Amino acid sequence: MAKWALLGYTDCTDSAREGEFNEWYDKVHLPDVLQLPSFVSATRYVNIDPKVTSDKFLAIYEVESDDIDKTVETLKKRGAQLRDQGRLTDLLIIGPIAVYRQLSSMTSEPLRVD
């Protein structure tokens, strides 16, 4: 099974309501996406260098799929369903979505002190 990183850039329409936006994203949106087949985990980040990109937030989804195009299409269809069900927020600005296929993986080993 191929492993992928799906990067979703987003922003909030009202900086005064970012707390509300982040709570919705973490407690509603991420769990909704993680119910989809192939989506393994999600981690969110905040941009500390707006010169690189104007998008303030980044969600990285770990995906395992042999058909990433179908997986992304399923995500888009589910997004439309969630919108129709009122599970999206008016605070959400959707930026670019990027998909990367995993080439390698490594984890650090704890430093041994003798």
Image: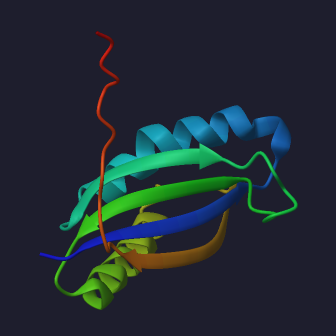
Q: How many marks?
A: 0
Residue drawn at (88%, 61%), measured in percent from left and top? 51
Residue drawn at (51%, 55%), measured in percent from left and top? 59
The vertical placement of 86 against 6, above or below, is: above
Image quarter (top left, top right, bottom left or bottom right) of the N terminus? bottom left
Q: Position of residue 106 (x, y in %)?
A: 30, 53
Q: Position of residue 109 (x, y in %)?
A: 29, 34
Q: How is the image coloured?
A: rainbow
Q: Residue 1 vs residue 24: left or right?
A: left
Residue drawn at (31%, 26%), measured in percent from left and top? 110
Q: Residue furthest top?
A: 114
User: Which of the 4 image quarters holds residue 20?
Assistant: top right
Q: Residue furthest right?
A: 51
Q: Residue furthest left?
A: 1
Is there any visible trace of residue 88 in the rendered image?
no
The vertical placement of 8 against 89, above or below, is: below
Residue drawn at (28%, 9%), measured in percent from left and top? 114
User: Which of the 4 image quarters holds residue 32?
Assistant: bottom left
Q: Position of residue 35 (x, y in %)?
A: 23, 56
Is there any visible trace of residue 68 in the rendered image?
yes
Q: Position of residue 85 (x, y in %)?
A: 42, 62
